[in-house]
Amino acid sequence: RAGRPAVGTRTGVDRWHGPTRRRGADRRRQVARTGYGDDHPSSEESGSMAAAPRRQPQWLPYTAAVTAGLVVIAGAFLVVRERDAGTGGPRADCAVHLEVNSSTEKAELLAELAERYNDSGRTITDGECARVRVTPLNSGKATEALATGWRDTGLPQPQVWLPTSSLWTGQLRLLDRAAGRAEQTPDTYPSIANSPLVIAMPKPKGDLVREQGPLGWGQILGLSGRQGWAQFGRPEWGRFTFGKDNPNLSTSGLAATIATYYAAVSRSSDLTRADLADPAVTQFVRRIEANVSHYSDDSVELLRDLAEADLRGGPGGPDDMSAMVLQEELVHLYNEGGLSPREEGQAQGRRPTVPLVAVHPKEGTFNLDHPFVVLPTADDSQRAAAEDLLAFLTEDAQQADFADLGFRDHERRASAELLAGVGAEPEGGLTYFAPPDPTVVEEMLHGWSTLRKKANVLIALDTSGSMEASVGDRTRFQVASAAAGKGLALLNSEDRVGLWSFSSETRERPKGPYREEVQLGDFDQKRITTRISGLHVEGGTALYTTVRAAHRHLVERYDPQRINAVVVLTDGKNEYGKDNDLARLLADVQLDPQRPVKVFCIAFDRDSDFETLDRIAKASSGKAFDATDPTKIDEAFVKLVSSF
């Protein structure tokens, strides 16, 4: 899901634009802090990605679960950050109005550039002027909206679409064909910026890997998992695992999956559906997926955790990870301090002590091309305006703004400053994989669920008395149970799942504050959902003792071939006097890189102690999801399940 707007500045560029440029960079720094971007689940969910008539695609359930949350986020972004460029200003009377919808990671910059365009005095045909307005929406949601007449977005219908990748224009073609209508995106489109996929590593590790000479995807992310860093002469660094976004939710995750398949067939183009069925190919992909630490809904959050640990002088964020697969632009963002903690009033955080470097696999990589798409909704005058806007965006001054965010230019050229910051390219430059046919991408995602690393998950569900409180016409427990059922439906049949309930000692549970409801074992969704529906709600919230016991339970049943995680759903804070020691709990769940068991928390409803849940999750290199607004609980479960 491309990354957030970056922050770093380039002195030479600042001289070109002076104070205005600096103010723009400050605004983008604020967006970098808010966390909206196409590498975010609320951005690049790909439930909309394809609709083949022969079957319902694997990823469609994600859309139903998160649509409401996506519209809320897009609306909030629009209210806070939309630049209704030119309204009331010198171009308010322009006859041509051009609506542009951009993927969220670059929307803030595009809105600023629209202001600049509107103030530039440019004219199009017959001396007319155009007023450009930019609104943000993640690429996956925009794909779905364009396929359904742009309904339910709350945003103006665009004449120009700027997604993260041409992968989305291909998926929109599939949706149009399936519906029997004219294709909205039948062509190839020019880029306004580019960002290749890289393997990002902390500099000492990345430098060591580079010293080995050219290595491939399998050698870096697959074979290395057998012996860990001992294979590279550093056994003290432990095992080798890496972080990757879920391809159902993220452009980067999808691009990483495509790159893995290309590496498996030793080609850079013409990937076919027959390739996907080749046993040797599936074995290659499965071997790489086996080294995933856990899947992420948001690689930016992983980088923020890494930046916080760097600031504390610790070993670094999700410290069982040796690498992350993400956009080069995000490496720049991290190294410039854009994701580091910052004090009140600071424009950006401190640059990390240990920067990341970009490692380029020898087979090649996938490029996120940020296409400029003129849609059929544009009339002749709007098409002329779009042509002029494209020319404007590809001029040197505007391209410098993209470079400032860590992007390569519209012709894939990297600035010297970017390469100096993230790492030089291989001699002879990068090899890029060609985008596969959209039907191949569809088939790839359908099959990914069987190849991804499987999970070993223990769910701890809060059944304290406060879960009886009303949320509309239902109780908190009913809302939470329904969301859990939807989330469980997205797990794989080969996952192992267990269920505990917890509150405090009650008449129903006199011997202790938690109880095993379904033993950890082969996933049986019907059994778990039936057991949840029969649970009794009573008592206080024995949060700390339950998390400690659940974590210990999973450590004792640790499976090195799976992602091992505790999932905690609670509407409250710890109310159990027998165990009220948070510091001890944080120490007890601290991640052991040799047997990593991560804690994921969903803070449900307004009484939840999200700050504490976040501390617990981060101690284990897991993540807390904020559903204190109960309407967002479905979205939170989708994000959580995308980690497995």
Image (tube, rainbow, N blue to C red):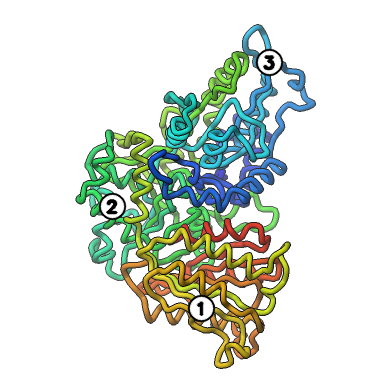
The quadrant where residue 223 appears: bottom left
Query: Is any part of residue 408 visible from this angle?
Result: no
- Mark 1, secondary structure of its residue: strand
Q: Is residue 329 left or right of residue 123?
A: left
Mark 3 surroundings: few (<14), some (14-19) or many (≥20) residues within 10 A: many
Give the labeled residue for mark 3.
129
The quadrant where residue 544 appears: bottom right
Circles 1 and 3 in contact, beta carbons < 8 Å: no
Circles 1 and 2 in contact, beta carbons < 8 Å: no
Check the image and report above or below for 583 versus 28. Answer: below
Question: Which mark, residue 285?
Answer: 2
Check the image and report above or below for 216 versus 294. Answer: above
Q: What's under tag 2, amino acid-wise? A: Val
Check the image and report above or below for 466 versus 246. Answer: below
Q: What's under tag 1, amino acid-wise? A: Trp
Give the quadrant of the C terminus.
bottom left
